[in-house]
Image: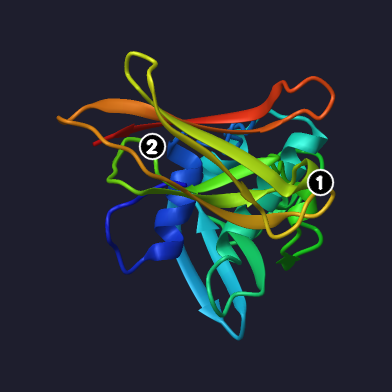
Amino acid sequence: MHQVPYTKEVIKAALEELINTNPVTPGAVRVLPAGTKIRGISVQDGLATVDFSRDVLRANVGASGEELGIQSIINTVTEFPGVQKVSFLVEGTVDQEAKNWWGHVGLYSQPFARDVAKVYEPAIWLTSPAPDQVVASPLEVRGSARVFEATVSARLLDDSGKELASGFATAAQGAPGRGDFVLPLKYQVNSPGKGKVEVYWKSPKDGKEMDKVVIPVAW
């Protein structure tokens, strides 16, 4: 989960996060070219039109990377209420260079609809805590998971590696489905400090910790 300063231009802020920050989700990569600017966004009758600077066309990726880049924009924008489809402009228009986009998929099928099947989806996806968040007991670990028998495990460690708390929770559904989970961790500390939350699932074959997500926190 990314945190951004308060703004009324929430869609623009979300897209700027895609452009300017590294993903917090393990395995995800940044695909939009650095330096890309959002010139404007309009929403009418469920269609969001995003106007990019021409810098957006400078990516050098393959066909799969292009599809991922386009879909990551669409899925981000359609997270917001009232948006069902998305169209792109480049410097206020869609000329031939813009239609070609990054040279493979292109913008020939605009407007685009949401499709989460075309983006990387980790086994464990955390929404709380955020990286470097100041937490208190009980610490609620929240997210969604697609894991064996829906069982998600977590622990809180201090900066020396000492375990302060651990537990497990059952997500709303197990693999191949995805379900939400909430896992409270109760702990005691005597002074401010830093540590990390580790969230994972255990292999039924050998007990190995799988798809571990590590989030730094403070208290």
Q: Secondary structure at mark 2?
A: loop
Q: Visible in this render: residue 60?
A: yes
Gap between marks 2 and 1, in whole Å? 34 Å
- The quarter in which the C terminus is drawn is top left
The residue positioned farthest toward the top in the image shown: 160
Q: Nearer the viewer, residue 165 or 154?
A: 165
Q: Is residue 65 left or right of residue 57?
A: right
**Callout 2, which amino acid?**
Pro
Tell me whether the residue at label 2 lies in contact with that at label 1, contact meaning CB atoms closer than 8 angstroms: no
Is disc 1 placed on a helix, strand or loop? loop
**Can you give x and y, in whole percent of width and height, for residue 28 in the image?**
62, 34
Q: Which mark is residue 105?
A: 1
Q: Amino acid at mark 1?
A: Val
Q: Earlier in the sequence, mark 2 or mark 1?
A: 1
Taking 175 as reference, is 94 left or right? left
Residue 33 at least partly seen: no
Disc 2 or disc 1, which is closer to the eye? 2
- Give me the residue at 62% from left, 81% from top: 46
For the point 30% across and 46% down, which residue is it? 137
Tell whether 128 sits left or right of 49.
left
16 vs 93, nearest the viewer: 16
Q: For residue 15, which numbered disc appears in the image?
A: none
To which quarter of the image does residue 186 belong? top left
* Residue 180 image offset from top left, x and y in percent: 63, 57
**Residue located 49% across and 41% down the image:** 19
Which residue in the protein does label 2 denote? 131
